[in-house]
Every structure is written in C-alpha cells, then in structure tokens.
Image: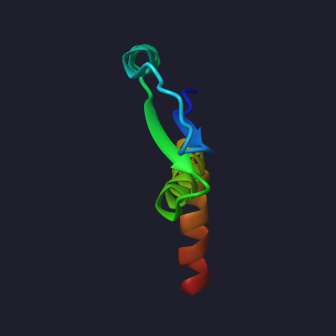
Amino acid sequence: MKLPVVVLQCRTDQENEEEINSSEIWETLNKYDTGLVQVSIADPNLKYKMKMSFDYLLMAVLRQRGILLLISLNLLLKRS
C-alpha cells in the first residue's frame, strides 16, 4: 500500500529566516515524488494551509483504505 506523502516546511521565525538551498530540497522531493507546503502558526493564511494539509492526508489515507467510502455510504443510509 502506497501512502500519500507531503512535506511541511514549518516557518516559526520569518524575520530571522536563514536561506535554504531550494534546488537541493526540490531535487530530494522529486526523488520521492512528493510536494512541499510552507506553513506557519504566525501567519493565519499559512496556518490554514497547515490544517488543510493534514485534512488532505487524512482523507487520502481513508480513501485509499476504503474507509471513506464506508463512512459516506453509512451517512447516506442514515438519511434515507
């Protein structure tokens, strides 16, 4: 079973941020066929991206295991 992978770059101190060699990072990420999401608890937009990243991973795992389908079917049956 292949699980989804996302790399989160957590930025805690944007004022004193050190330069990161982005070409080296992308080279490594491309080896593993994954993406990069920059997140931060200081910036509300980047904080939201963090939440959405975890939601995406959870839904992808549930979908892959067939659990999401079962939950959806269960909700539909309860409404009937």
Residue sitting nearer the eye, 40 or 50? 40
- Compared to residue 19, the image places residue 78 above or below, namely below
At 39% from the left and 14% from the top, the residue drawn is: 27
Q: Let me know if residue 76 appears in the view.
A: yes
Q: Residue 12 location, x and y as percent?
A: 63, 45
Residue sitting nearer the eye, 70 or 42? 42
Q: Residue 72 location, x and y as percent?
A: 54, 66
Determine which quarter of the picture holds residue 31: top left
At 55% from the left and 38% from the top, the residue drawn is: 8
Residue sitting nearer the eye, 66 or 49? 49
Q: Let me know if residue 63 appears in the view.
A: no
Query: Could you tell me how many numbered marks the image carries?
Result: 0
- Compared to residue 34, the image places residue 58 above or below, namely below
Q: Residue furthest front?
A: 16
Q: How is the rendered protein coloured?
A: rainbow
At 61% from the left and 63% from the top, the residue drawn is: 71
- The quarter in which the N terminus is drawn is top right
- The quarter in which the C terminus is drawn is bottom right
Q: Residue 73 location, x and y as percent?
A: 55, 67
